[in-house]
Image: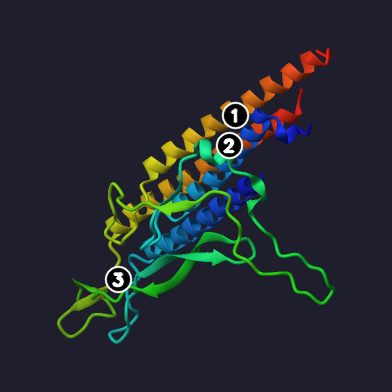
Amino acid sequence: MTFDNLTIFAAVKRRLNWLTQRQEILAQNIANADTPQFRAKDLKAFDFKDIVRREGMQLNIEITDSSHLPGRRKRLRDFTEFEERRPFETAPNGNSVIVEEQMGKINGSQINHRLTTSLYKKHLNMFKIALGRN
Amino acid sequence: MDDIIKTMQISSAGMRAQGARLKVISENLANANSLPQDANGKPYRRKIITFSNELDRSMGLNKVGIGKITADMSSFGKKFDPNHPAADQDGYVLTPNVNTLIEMTDMREAQRSYEANMEVIKASKSMLAGTIDILRR
């Protein structure tokens, strides 16, 4: 029994991955809040399928000989991102980033992050109780 | 964890871009009254900064980059001042094409965008602190 096989820990791990990746995308949106023609992006919502999906789906290119070159792949993203198709408003220079909306999303993922880490801690404490080391 | 560090780098690139924008704005404002030296000379021409979305290949990120700083080619203003050394035969002096109001508005926008980037860094920092907090008892 490894740590990752326990449902809560695996779910927490994926959830934290999703949150940090989303934070990266939101930061890109805000940094480009004044870039002409920039379209706001977001991650697809985290759902049950993401919890169930196995990690081993992504294949890496194996190096079996010293003369092999490491394969140059696109960066693997765990979750799919999408461009906001119908933004609330678009600036005259083609930029569709609404800073207020992005800040709201960032706050949301911050709260979710706190919730997830608290869940993790609570669960870990239960294990400690079970081990009799409270 | 890695993504959060990258978040901070993206935000700091955004802050750097806004800083460069503020530099150009202050240049424009400081030269809002720079008149030509003689009748053939030209007054200060307003500068414009543009931002572009550029890919940082080493990290696979879309950062914000500073594009070209170009000159605003709109026409100069004119002021009647026959005693000025740069006045033409009708007594007019060319004035820079800097509109102080536009520059101030631009400055405010840069300031707000800078603050927004700073808030993102703060949010990322607290998320990182939350993750590190798991390690504590």
Against A17, is B39 above or below?
below
Say what secondary structure mark 3 lies in: loop
Q: Quadrant of the N terminus of chain A?
A: top right
Residue at screen point 73% across, 69% down? A70
Q: CA distance from mark 1 to mark 3?
A: 57 Å
Residue at screen point 43% across, 40% down? A103
| Mark 1 surroundings within 10 Å by alpha-carbon count, few (fewer than 14), some (14 through 19), many (20 or more) | many
Q: Chain of mark 1?
A: A
- Residue A17 visible somewhere in the drawing: yes
Say what secondary structure mark 2 lies in: helix
The kind of residue tagged 2 is Arg
The numbered disc on residue A15 is 2
Label pair 2/3, CB-CB below 8 angstroms: no
For the residues beneath circles 2 and 1, the answer to whether they share a chain is yes
Q: Is residue A16 left or right of residue B98?
A: right
User: Which residue is label 1 attached to?
Assistant: A116
Q: Where's residue B104, x and y in %?
A: 33, 53
State which quadrant residue A16 falls in.
Answer: top right
| Residue nearer the viewer, B72 or A77 | A77
Q: Chain of mark 2?
A: A
Q: Where's residue B102, x and y in %?
A: 29, 58
User: Which residue is label 3 attached to?
Assistant: B96
Label pair 2/1, CB-CB below 8 angstroms: yes
The kind of residue tagged 3 is Pro
- Residue B122 visible somewhere in the drawing: no
Q: Quadrant of the C terminus of chain A?
A: top right
